[in-house]
Amino acid sequence: MSKLAAQDKFLDLSDYGRTFGRFFAYQLKDSRFTPIHVTLLFGFSGLIAIYCILEHHYWLAGFFILLKSGIDAADGELARLKNTPSYSGRYLDSVFDIILNFMLLMAICYVSKTNIGFTFLAFIGLQLQGTLYNYYYVILRNKSVGGDGTSKIFEYKTPKALPGETQKSVTVLFGIYLMLYGLFDKIIHALDPNAYKVKTFPNWFMTLLSLYGLGFQLLIIAIMLPLGWIEFIVPFFTVYTLLIVVLIAIRKVFIA
């Protein structure tokens, strides 16, 4: 089941792991494995990638980063196949993503000559990039007929637990999610507060926006590592953040 209606589907450059994720999910469809188990697995893959960076095994690090992206796509696919959507899984996925992003950049900082302050700035930029992508994408998903509505445009209220999960787990994970993502969400919402009023986003714009999707960000890192460009990763993502201004300007001028 797609997150979007047919007319709203677009070429998502960050979603290259979807084919593998769908295949992996189908293998687990009739098993006891749950989407939460898959989320834990992609977290483990991310940790292996970080360890490989610390040991200077950059080809292996790139492989496990891409594997993490593929497995990351599988938890949502499995939830749809088993018809077991959950807020717990949605928030746990996001919490793992931001923690792994931070650890990944800090590992790169540790083995390179990059300044830690500069690395923290790149991390903020990386999260703002992903938040902009998610902001517009969730708006589109919520407006798309038959699309997935588990994610909300404005995350400010603890949602009611869905069947199969406890309210306590939803409340705790939502609180952690707000603590980690709240500021980034507020910044992006402040930059384009009226985006939710748009009827829909054209496919070409969403494809351009997908340059900021987490999968594409990780693809860039997975390519730069084995090429020996580790010293340029932090500077790249710092400058890459400037594209936010361009994308928001395009939205305001051409998409009303």
Image (cartoon, rainbow, N blue to C red):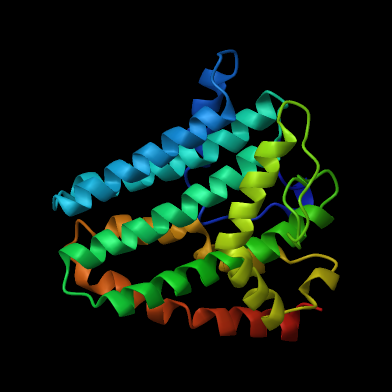
In the image, what residue occupies the spot 83% across and 56% down? 143
Query: In which image quadrant can residue 70 be found?
Result: top left
The quadrant the C terminus occupies is bottom right
Observer able to see residue 159: yes
Residue in the picture at 76% in, 63% down? 154
Direction left: furthest residue? 56
Q: Position of residue 103 (x, y in %)?
A: 34, 57
Residue 65's place in the image compared with 156, above or below, is above
Above or below, 86 against 249 in this view is above
- Relative to 242, does residue 177 appear above or below in the rendering? above
From what the image shows, is residue 237 above or below residue 80?
below
Q: Residue at x 41, y 58 (%)?
A: 101
User: Looking at the image, which is closer to me, 98 or 25?
Assistant: 98
The location of residue 116, given as percent across then percent down, is 28, 74
- In the rendered structure, the answer to whether residue 200 lies left or right of residue 192 reads right
The residue under the point 29% across, 63% down is: 106
Q: Considering the image in quadrants, where does the N terminus appear?
A: top right
Q: How many marks?
A: 0
> Is residue 224 at all visible to an observer of this figure?
no
Front in this rendered view, residue 19 or 242: 242
State the image coordinates of residue 135 (x, y, percent, origin top left): 67, 65
Observer-nearest of 160 and 118:
160
Image quadrant of residue 217?
bottom left
Q: Position of residue 137 (x, y in %)?
A: 68, 60
Horizontal arrangement in the rendering, residue 202 relative to residue 35 (left or right): right
**Residue 215 horizontal side relative to residue 161, left or right:** left
Q: Is residue 133 left or right of residue 222?
A: right
